[in-house]
Amino acid sequence: MIKDKILMVSDYPFVKNEGGPRGYFNKCIVDNVPDNIHLINNVIPKKISIKKKLLIRLDKIISILKNRKYRNKNLANKFIKVKKYKFLYFHDMYSFYDVIHLIQKNQIVIFQSHSPETPSEEEYKLGARGKTYEKILKIEKGVFERTNYLILPNEKCKVIYQKILKAQHKIAYLTTGIKPITNLVKIPLKDDKINIFYIGRRNEIKGFPLLIKNFEEVLKVRNDLRLFIAGSGELSSKNENIIDLGITHRAYDWINSVDYVISLNEKSYFDLNIIEAIAINTPLIMTTTEGHEFFKNRKGIISVDEDNLLATLTNKNIIQKKYKEKRKEDLQQFYLKELSHLVYKQRLEDLASKIIIENN
């Protein structure tokens, strides 16, 4: 058994600009792992033993008999192929559950969820009901009962998972850091307005109704603002200065081109799009709840809540055309010192070393 390395069981395809575990894996981890972390795709032997071939065949047969439905049918096969690692690291509960029956009692499991609420709560709000929801609850229960270490971005995120934390859980913290964003293009926006960009789901937990309600009120007071909205969903406003872009594959170019990015999460985990805006050196107007308290009082971050959002947006001393240029260097230094891929890689190495030492 390999006791001095951690096997990261993350088998995600590369999809640019995706969020959640896949986005995290591709933007933070791919080509950026320390020596004490191994990725499952990098350690699969070209030739495997007859014993392991039989194990794969047996797992398939048992899975059919038990009507086990995989989200990723190939992951269990890959998991069987590699040598046994004492430490296993997962990034989403479905991949975890796909191989949970293959994990030995003496293996240490590390789980890093990327949901802004418990996974079952998130799935319920996305429409899961009936037998589907019961299955999700079963998966969540099994995964958290088998987890030894739960990894969170910071201590303020702990409250999100409080109701499903177990006595055996050890909590560790790992601040997200992303690779540099390159090949940016400037979208030719008219300079007659202060341009603000929103990207994400159009629901209450993301603060979208709050944003539209307040922005319509702001436009009655000042006419020098324009809001661009990216993402899927309905938009009730007909105001000409609230523009629906729909789904866009140029999110980074929009962030690069506008004056501000706005994020009004009711509950906050540690969103990649916040870090991306900082990496691109575009100021943020944002709520700083739970995990996002990390960004409070940072230069280039304008912290708001439901009570002061309207006052902030109408204040021309705060929301102004020159603000981005004034804070560009501050945001760049914030990214380089605390949120870059290099800083993240060192933190991940330190975290892995700590867990390995504690259990050997």
Image (tube, grey):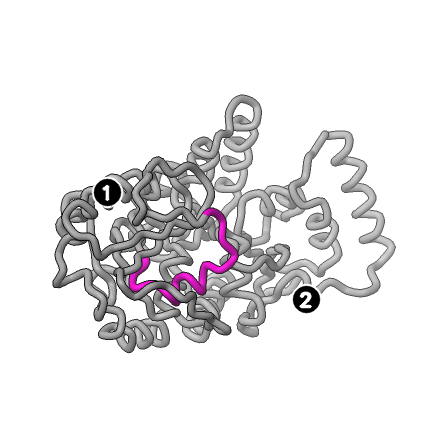
Give the residue drawn at x 36%, y 50%.
Answer: 269
Q: Nearer the viewer, mark 2 or mark 1?
A: 1
Residue 79 seen in render:
yes
Q: Which mark is residue 42?
A: 2
**The magenta segment:** 246-261
Kindly identify the amino acid type of the residue bearing the numbered disc 2.
Asn
Rendered location of residue 170, percent (x, y) = 41, 52
Task: Tell me which numbered mark, 2 or 1, is placed earlier along the sequence.
Answer: 2
Say which quarter of the image contains residue 59: top right
Is residue 310 toward the left or the right of residue 96 in the image? left
Q: Which mark is residue 216?
A: 1
Query: Between residues 67 and 104, which one lies in front from this camera angle?
Result: 67
Is residue 122 toward the left or the right of residue 194 in the image? right
Find the distance from the CA under tag 2 to the CA under tag 1.
51 Å
- The verdict on residue 177 being magenta is no
How would you rate the neighbour count of disc 1 (Cα within 10 Å): few for under 14, some for 14-19, many for 20 or more? some
Rendered location of residue 298, percent (x, y) = 23, 66
Q: Residue furthest top?
A: 130
Say which quarter of the image contains residue 62: top right
How would you rate the neighbour count of disc 2 (Cα within 10 Å): few for under 14, some for 14-19, many for 20 or more? few
Instruction: Label 2, secondary structure: give it.
Output: helix
Kindly identify the amino acid type of the residue bearing the numbered disc 1.
Glu
Give the residue drawn at x 64%, y 43%.
Answer: 98
Residue 110 seen in render:
no
Give the residue drawn at x 45%, y 47%.
Answer: 231
Rendered location of residue 162, percent (x, y) = 34, 41
- The verdict on residue 255 being magenta is yes
The quadrant in which the N terminus is found is bottom right
Instruction: Label 1, secondary structure: give it.
Output: helix
Q: Is residue 27 above or below residue 98?
A: below
